[in-house]
Image (cartoon, helix red, strand yellow):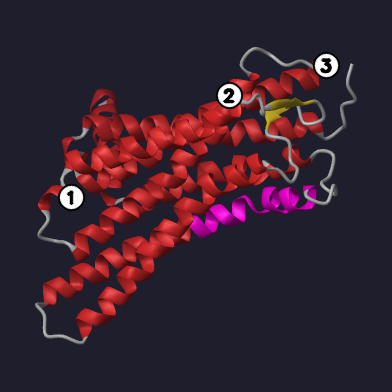
Amino acid sequence: MTVVESWFIPLDILMIIPITLAVILGMIFLIVISIDKTCHTVPMMFTANRLLSAFVLGCVLLSLCVFTLINDLRQVQYQDSLCVFRGYMVYAVGAAQNYSNAVEAFYRYILVVYPTRLYFRSIRFQALIICISWIISFIYAFAFLFNDEIIYNVDNQICQLPLRLSFSILYMSFCTYGIPILLIVFYYFKLVRYVKEIRRHTIPTNTLLRAQRELKMVERIVIRIIVMILTFLPLTLFTFMSFFNRAPKYHFRIAYIPMYIAMFPLLILLFLVTAPLKVSVMKRMKCRSNVVVSTVA
């Protein structure tokens, strides 16, 4: 029997609620995008990719949280057969979610700097890039499974890489966060430089407006990255503290709180800023309300 602090179970329930709502909302948005032909465009493909990664990650985190809650309720130390696999999926799908932002930033960059290269802007090519980003995400994290580095943490009731100064932690941090963030920053500053350069020359107004519009879209991606960094700030802090053996005992329980809570409002925000998705959902809600009214009448 393991020691269960008084705040464990309320915290488990607190995290289950928003992640469940996020999974349901993500599934609804994915269904709407799949059945509405007006959403079958390249920009919406990136939205669908982000929603898919959020949905899969949400399912994994929900399974992880339910497992933690059950063990806390039973006051047992128990590693089920899926524990290590859930840990692997957290790293793999988390990376896929971050790379989804980098892939979209690449598309916005291509759209402005190479507008005549139509193949690079095509659905087929961008779908290929998205598939490659998912493949890379799952392959990089497979090393943790192969080396049996994902282990069961008794205090936190979770299977993760142990927080300590190690190659695996540095490798995971660089592949999951470092590479996509560096790519996004690279595309952002390249676009900023490009917009400044074309302002100095006589060019069609629509070319400048398109470049400024795509730059604003990349700025939104940068904002999402900043929000992500803030969300993972406790985990980053505890990881750094673990290098000096100063991480708190329940570091994973505390560090994952912002990630669980933030996923649902972030999906709401994605819905509000994505016009085609918003229009499609509102149109269906309006049609359904009209049907209800006519039935009652």
Q: Is residue 191 left or right of residue 178?
A: left
Please state, as top left, top right, bottom left or bottom right, where the C terminus lies in the image.
Answer: top left
Secondary structure under tag 2 reads helix
- Give the residue pinned by disc 1: 120
Placement of 84 over or under 125, stated as above or below: above
x, y (%) of residue 47? Answer: 33, 44
Q: Does the segment drawn in magenta span residue 232? A: yes
- Give the residue pinned by disc 3: 76
Residue at 67%, 29% in the rendered image: 149
Question: Which of labels 3 and 2 is toward the front?
Answer: 2
Q: Mark 1 belongs to which amino acid?
A: Phe
Residue 85 visible in the picture: yes
x, y (%) of residue 49? Answer: 35, 39
- Give the residue pinned by disc 2: 146
Q: Mark 3 belongs to which amino acid?
A: Val
Residue 219 visible in the picture: no
Nearer-N-terminus badge (1/3): 3
Residue at mark 1 to residue at mark 3: CA–CA distance: 54 Å
Secondary structure under tag 1 reads helix
Dominant SS in magenta: helix
Residue at 31%, 67% in the rendered image: 215
Q: Mark 2 belongs to which amino acid?
A: Phe
Q: Which mark is residue 58?
A: none
